[in-house]
Image (spheres, helix red, strand yellow):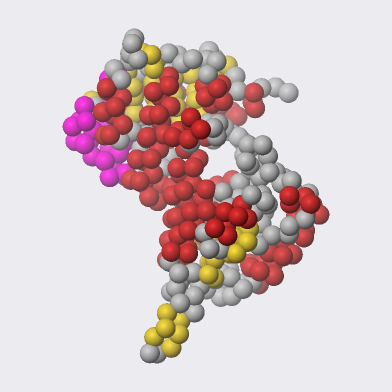
Amino acid sequence: MRVAVPAEIDAVETRVAATPETIKKLIGLGASVTVQSGAGRASGVTDSDYTAAGASLAGSAAETLADADLVLKVRRPAPAELAAYKRGAAVIAIMDPYGHEDDLAAIAGAGLTGFAMEFMPRITRAQVMDVLSSQANLAGYRAVIDGAGEYGRALPMMMTAAGTVPAARIFIMGVGVAGLQAIATARRLGAIVTATDVRPATKEQVESLGAKFVAVEDDEFKQAETAGGYAKEMSADYKAKQAALVASHIARQDIVITTALIPGRPAPRLISADMVHSMRAGSVIIDLAVERGGNCELSKPGETVITDNGVHIVGHLNVPGRLAATASSLYAKNLLAFVETLIDKEAKSLAPKWDDELVKATLLTRDGAIVHQNFLPK
C-alpha cells in the first residue's frame, strides 16, 4: 500500500496532511509513504524530519503521486493536478465541494475515490476524525489574537498610577466550536465578552464560559437547531428582530468576531454596512466566514478594509493555516484516525467497508461517478 503526501498548490495553504508522527504510524500499518520535498516547510516540518520518520522524498508532485493507492491532502485536488493521479486511487482531503461541482466532476472523471473529511458525521466514534472542530477551534483562538493585534488598545482592565484602562468589549457572533474558543480566549485575555447564536443550546455554553448571551429568545429561537446540531435558516421576521438587537449592541463593541456558517450555503449576513458605520473609530471586525461570502457586508476575502469611520474589517483567508504547525498536527491526526478504519490490518492494504457509516457519509466519488447524495441530480 503506497501513501502519497503531495505539497499543497494553493498559495494561501500553509498546512500539510501528514506529520512525522502520523507517518510513523502509517508505516506501522504496512504503508510505504512518499512525501513531496518541501511539503511541510510552511508548517515547520523539514524534509529530514520526514525521512527520519521513515518516509521517502520525491522532487515533484508527479513523482510523489506515481502509483499511489492513497493520497492525503489538505485541499481537494485541482483539475490541473489530476493527470498525475493513478486511476482508482483514494484521496482524502477537505473537499469543499459546494459551489465547486465542476471540480468534483473532474475528480470523478479521473477515476478517484474521493473522501470529504468535512462530511464526517458528528458521532462519538468519529470525534477524533472531526476536522471541522479541530480547525475551527484554532480559528476561534487565532481570531481573538488577530483582533487584539489589530485593535490599538489593551484588552484587560488595568489600574495604573496614570489612570485606569477600561477592558475591551468583544462580541462573538456564532457560537460553534470557533465561537466557543474565541469566547474562552477573549475571557482569558481579560475582555468583557458577549456572544450570540440562533441555537438555544448555546446560551448555557456561553454563560458557562463567563460571557453574556445576546439573542431574541422567542418561540422560533427555541426551535432553531437541526438534529445534527447545526443552525437552521431563520425566518425574515426573526432576522429583522435579531438584527435590531444586534445593531444596538454592536455599536458599543470594540472587537466583533463573526463565525456563522451554514453547511452548503453562503454565509449568513450578520453585520450590515449601517452597523459598521455605527461603530467607533479603531474598532475591529474579524470575519471568519469571509471565504463563504462573509458575515459582514463590507468584508473582502484576503484583505483588511478600513472604513471611512475608521473600523478595521479583517478578512484573512485560511485562518487555521495562520497556526500552520498546530493545525497540521491536528489535521494529520484526524486523517490518520480515518485511514485506520479503511485499512485491512491483516492484508495491510486499503479496503474500505462501503457500508460503514463513516465511509457512506464522506464518500464523494467512486468508479468514475459522483456518489454522494447531496450532489446527485434531484
Quarter of the image where one finds residue 208: bottom right
What residue is rendered at 63% in x and 58% in y? 196
Q: Residue drawn at (49%, 19%), measured in percent from left and top?
A: 113
Above or below 353: residue 329: below
In the displayed structure image, the side of residue 82 where residue 108 appears, left or right: right
User: Is residue 375 among what the camera can see?
Assistant: yes
Visible in this render: residue 296? no
Residue depicted at x 61% and y 73%: 252
The mark tally for this picture is 0
Q: Does residue 23 lie above or below 246 as drawn?
A: above
Image coordinates of residue 270 in percent, x first then y, are 66, 57
What residue appears at the point 51 percent right and 73 percent down from the top-left corner? 168
Magenta-highlighted residues: 31-54
Q: Position of residue 227 (x, y in %)?
A: 67, 37
Q: Where residue 209 sits in the image (x, y, percent)?
A: 52, 59
Above or below, comparing residue 221 to residue 367 in the picture: below
Please say if 270 is above or below 15: below
**Near-viewer residue (40 or 231):** 231
| Quadrant of the image containing the N terminus | top left
Residue in front for this viewpoint, 17 or 7: 17
Q: Is residue 148 magenta?
A: no
- Which quadrant would the C terminus be assigned to in this image? top right
Q: Give the camera-side residue of 246 and 358.
A: 358
